[in-house]
Image (spheres, rainbow, N blue to C red):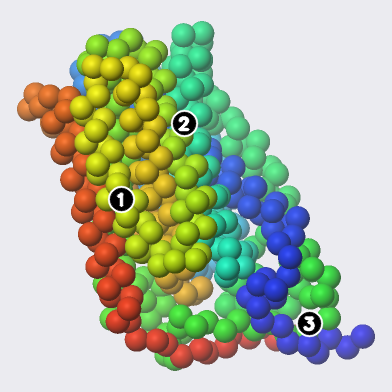
């Protein structure tokens, strides 16, 4: 049969049943992000053991705790433009290889300086993997379920971070802190082999870049056989304006007048969210121990904080049905109240456990929803750049959070005062999203140019 039918790839994804192949893509991205969360948070869980074995003080931990965050920022800022130019798949493969190998090597560090360098390299891989996993699953999702699926995939990060805490509490007494890093390096390398065989390139990216029809069709027929007779593929971009294609690709698009306010507010919200996340995930075991809890109890309660991120699935469902900016802004406002409450509960282990889990649920739900918000905000030709730069700039919030708590400890602020300061970051994130919501209502609507991959396209 002559293959002459033209097929809009997003309309095709919207109307077809979510296939087993798309669930495979979802699962691979989920495990990438889960391992990202495990490796990112691992250093916080082994910090008390490091302090004891190497005889270092709390302020000296700031450099190693923040080293991966500098790498995370650099990896995100670099990988987004590369993925928009060369594709999501290749960048993901390199990223997982890098963070898996470097994390395994970290287990052999003999001093703080070596560990700091290896954590920085680990961070480069982690920072590259996260935004491209978000972008890939977003581009394989139907419009009506995009936020739900992206948020569900992103739940892997807090689950991985929480898993790191539970495993660390069990593994460190048996095999020492190095065993946590060995596990965090070995599993990603095993996943890499599966990814190499099964992970596809984004069909939206392939159409945008004019890939050959046979290559695009080979992916789409895995979703539904109805794509087999298509001879050309198109993609209407409602978000784009005429003239965006050439001189204002990638990073420059983020700063066009119609995206500028939203870009800045996304950066602000993600920055403040990571101030909260890393100040707590890195320092809660130490703060709880100083407040009188046993080291194992402190680690287990701290591990409940990232576990609460599973609430992002509900947030994604709400985002697909209501104004996404407002949904996340409310989440951050409630987070501020909950974090303040953690600081008031130090004397009651049972109450502290409940409040930490509640604060983690609210905070991680709001934070985990921001990548889906960014993926929906930017067009295909700069989507990976938009998501990765939000994550990359936001990583400096994680760095600020790690150093902030060290400085608060140096100034001898009390337990409740530390959590009060951290709560103000959540208020700032909520305000930023309200501003973005107002800007989105006033944003001019673009045209709807159509990108085409024809029979002779390459």
Secondary structure found at label 2: helix
Callout 1 crowding tier (Cα within 10 Å): few <14, some 14–19, many ≥20: many
| 6 displayed left or right of 89 | right
Report if residue 444 is visible in the image: yes
Q: Quadrant of the C terminus?
A: bottom right
Residue at image coords 22%, 59%: 431
Q: Which residue matches tag 3?
A: 230
Instruction: Give the distance between the C-alpha atoms of the residues marked 3 and 2, in whole angstroms.
Output: 45 Å
Secondary structure found at label 1: helix
| Front tag of 3 and 1 | 1
Report if residue 46 is visible in the image: no
Q: Which residue matches tag 1?
A: 332
Q: Which mark is residue 162?
A: 2
| Front tag of 3 and 2 | 2
Q: Observer-nearest residue: 94 or 133?
A: 133
Of the image marks 3 and 1, the number of the one nearer the N terminus: 3
Of the image marks 2 and 1, the number of the one nearer the N terminus: 2
Instruction: Give the distance between the C-alpha atoms of the residues marked 2 and 1, in whole angstroms.
Output: 20 Å
Position above or below: 425 against 267: above
Instruction: Give the distance between the C-alpha atoms of the residues marked 3 and 1, in whole angstroms.
Output: 45 Å
The quadrant holding residue 236 is bottom right
Of the image marks 3 and 2, the number of the one nearer the N terminus: 2
**Coordinates of residue 129 in the picture (x, y in percent):** 50, 50
Q: Are marks 2 and 1 in contact (CB under 8 Å)?
A: no
| 228 displayed left or right of 57 | right
């Amino acid at each position: 049969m002559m293959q002459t039918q033209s097929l809009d790839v997003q309309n095709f994804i919207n109307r077809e049943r979510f296939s087993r192949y798309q669930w495979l893509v979802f699962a691979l991205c989920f495990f990438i992000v889960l391992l990202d969360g495990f490796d990112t948070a691992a250093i916080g869980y082994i910090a008390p053991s490091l302090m004891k074995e190497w005889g270092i003080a709390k302020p000296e931990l700031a450099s190693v705790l923040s080293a991966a965050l500098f790498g995370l920022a650099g990896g995100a800022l670099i990988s987004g433009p590369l993925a928009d130019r060369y594709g999501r798949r290749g960048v993901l493969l390199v990223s997982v290889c890098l963070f898996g190998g470097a994390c395994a090597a970290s287990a052999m560090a003999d001093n703080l300086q070596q560990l700091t360098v290896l954590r920085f390299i680990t961070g480069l891989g982690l920072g590259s993997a996260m935004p491209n996993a978000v972008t890939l699953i977003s581009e394989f999702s139907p419009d009506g379920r995009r936020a739900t699926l992206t948020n569900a995939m992103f739940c892997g990060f807090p689950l991985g971070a929480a898993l790191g805490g539970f495993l660390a509490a069990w593994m460190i007494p048996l095999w020492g802190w190095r065993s946590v890093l060995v596990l965090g390096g070995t599993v990603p390398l095993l996943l890499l082999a599966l990814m190499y065989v099964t992970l596809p390139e984004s069909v939206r990216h392939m159409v945008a870049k004019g890939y050959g029809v046979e290559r695009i069709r080979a992916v789409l027929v895995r979703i539904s056989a109805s794509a087999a007779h298509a001879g050309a593929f198109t993609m209407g971009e409602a978000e784009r304006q005429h003239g965006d294609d050439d001189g204002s690709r990638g990073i420059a698009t983020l700063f066009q007048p119609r995206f500028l306010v939203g870009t800045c507010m996304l950066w602000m919200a993600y920055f403040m969210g990571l101030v909260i996340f890393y100040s707590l995930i890195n320092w809660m075991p130490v703060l709880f121990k100083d407040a009188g809890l046993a080291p194992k109890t402190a680690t287990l309660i701290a591990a409940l904080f990232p576990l609460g991120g599973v609430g992002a699935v509900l947030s994604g469902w709400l985002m697909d049905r209501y104004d996404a900016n407002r949904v996340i802004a409310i989440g951050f406002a409630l987070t501020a109240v909950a974090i303040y409450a953690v600081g008031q509960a130090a004397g009651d282990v049972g109450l502290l456990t409940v409040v930490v889990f509640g604060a983690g649920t609210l905070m991680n739900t709001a934070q985990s929803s921001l990548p889906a918000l960014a993926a929906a905000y930017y067009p295909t030709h700069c989507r990976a750049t938009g998501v990765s730069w939000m994550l990359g700039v936001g990583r400096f919030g994680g760095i600020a959070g790690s150093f902030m708590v060290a400085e608060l400890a140096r100034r001898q602020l009390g337990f409740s005062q530390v959590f009060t300061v951290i709560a103000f970051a959540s208020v700032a994130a909520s305000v930023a999203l309200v501003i973005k919501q107002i800007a989105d209502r006033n944003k001019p609507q673009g045209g709807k140019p159509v990108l085409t991959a024809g029979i002779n396209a390459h």
